[in-house]
Image (tube, rainbow, N blue to C red):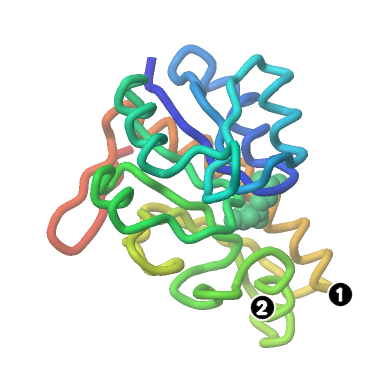
Amino acid sequence: MFSLAVFVSGRGSNLNSILNAPRLRNLIEVKVVVSNKEHCPAFDIAKKYSIPVYSVGNKEGFKSFNELENLFLSLEIDLIVLAGFLKLIPVAFIESFRNKIINIHPALLPSFGGSGMYGMNVHRAVFNSSAQVSGASIHFVDESYDTGKIIAQRSVDISDVHSPEELAERVLKIEHQLLPDVIEKFALGKVFVDKTRVRVLN
Ligand code: GRF
């Protein structure tokens, strides 16, 4: 089985989409769910599936990123998926898992990304720009917010939306399809990184 660690901070609908994707059922195992929070709704989803949860950070009782790194090495984690994780990952951790950490972003990067661009902030910015399409992007995680190489994107027509909330709903549907699709590609060894571009085989 291809082993995943999923990082979350909030409601966990993307975590849920991974756990419920029929195509991933006999292919992947989510071995741990990690949050920067002591508790978040996504932890309840993990617990429903008997997946161990850990909080990471400097607070008492939380794991440090160093401890997490050792845990992941012992669990032989193949891919780390940030699905709504709101904290910057320390550089040393990224270096240890170079090209093994991916993030899902609810807009078409490289637009509408960067510090402060998360959750409804993204959808409000897209709505106010009057962009006519939006979508989801999955990219490798590097040292800053949303700048790593893009692995996959899917777009959605938003020309008729009336609010940022309606836009967010439309994008979320796309996210729930794209993330399992991309994880499947990783699990099947179909993602390659060359000097400048990421290639995903059909
Ligand atoms: C998603 O929109 C994701 O793209 C972004 O944060 C949100 C997390 O939602 N990074 P959920 O916790 O998966 O429901």
Percent across and percent down for residue 76 are 31, 22
Which of marks 2 and 1 precedes in the sequence?
2
Relative to 122, 99 lies left or right? left
Relative to 141, 82 lies left or right? right
Residue 79 sits in quarter:
top left
Q: Which mark is residue 126?
A: 2
Relative to 153, 90 lies left or right? left
Picture mark count: 2
Quick one: which residue is furthest to the left in this view? 195
Q: On the rendered image, what quadrant is the N terminus found in?
A: top left
Q: Is residue 165 above or below residue 169?
A: below
Task: Please indicate, yes or no, whether residue 80 appears anywhere in the rendered image.
Answer: yes
Q: Residue at x 52, y 73 (%)?
A: 113
Q: Residue at x 59, y 58 (%)?
A: 86
Badge 1 crowding class, 10 Å Cα cut-off, few under 14, some 14 to 19, many 20 or more, is: few
Q: On the rendered image, what quadrant is the C terminus found in?
A: top left
Label 1 CB-ligand 1 distance < 8 A: no
Q: Residue at x 20, y 50 (%)?
A: 193
Q: Residue tagged by mark 1?
A: 162
Percent across and percent down for residue 51 are 60, 19
Q: Foreground: 159 or 55?
A: 55
Q: Amino acid at mark 2?
A: Val
Q: Foreground: 50 or 119?
A: 50
Q: Amino acid at mark 1?
A: His
User: Disc 1 on helix, strand or loop?
Assistant: loop
